[in-house]
Image: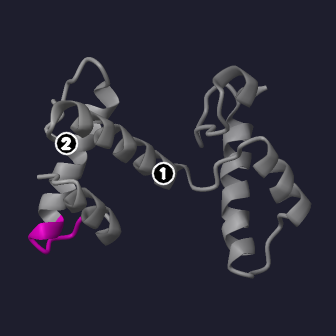
Amino acid sequence: AYQADKGHCNVPRQWRDNPQLGVWVNNQRVEKRKFDQSKRAKIRPEHVGRLDGIGFEWHPVANLWDQRFGELQAYQADKGHCNVPRQWRDNPQLGVWVNNQRVEKRKFDQSKRAKIRPEHVGRLDGIGFE
């Protein structure tokens, strides 16, 4: 029902409408990580297959980064640069994401503790992100 209504399976962990569903979705991701690491897991391969079949995202944060990066590449192709305004009306989420990447990349470049992966820094550098 959630997927049919929202078009995706990324139920928030603390979803007000159905808190148990949010907890269950998070637990499936935790168990799948254990399964992938060959650890004792409470999820069976057939359940993984069924969830895969409905488009369940096992790593939604990583998928979101890739989605926003693709949007940034499209912006760059259209505008010739990566300077998305923080409050860009056409895609406000991209503006916020770009600002966050810029802040975290600056920390990374200064060898400070940053919430950005080195491979993401490399991809951003590869498209001329400043």
What secondary structure is marked by label 2?
A: helix
Q: Residues within 10 Å of mark 1 (few under 14, many from 20)?
A: few
Residue 120 location (% of width, % of height): 32, 62
Q: Nearer the viewer, residue 31 or 51?
A: 51
**Please, is residue 52 above or below residue 10 in the view?**
below
Residue 65 location (% of width, % of height): 41, 50
**Can the viewer see residue 115?**
no
Q: What stretch is highlighted in magenta?
A: 108-114
Left of 9 or right of it: where is 49? right
Residue 80 location (% of width, % of height): 15, 37
Q: Nearer the viewer, residue 66 or 126?
A: 126
Quadrant of the rendered image containing residue 115: bottom left
Q: How is the image coloured?
A: one colour
Classified by dominant secondary structure, the portion drawn in magenta counts as loop
**Please, is residue 46 above or below residue 81 in the view?**
below
Quick one: label 1 or label 2, which is nearer the N terminus?
1
Question: Residue sitting at 26 percent across and 66 percent down?
Answer: 122
Distance from Cα at disc 1 to Cα at disc 2: 17 Å
Reply yes or no: does residue 110 show up in magenta: yes
**Three-letter amino acid code at the position of disc 2:** Asn
Q: Mark 2 points at which residue?
A: 99
**Three-letter amino acid code at the position of disc 1:** Val
Q: Name the residue under label 1.
A: 61
Reply yes or no: does residue 72 show up in magenta: no
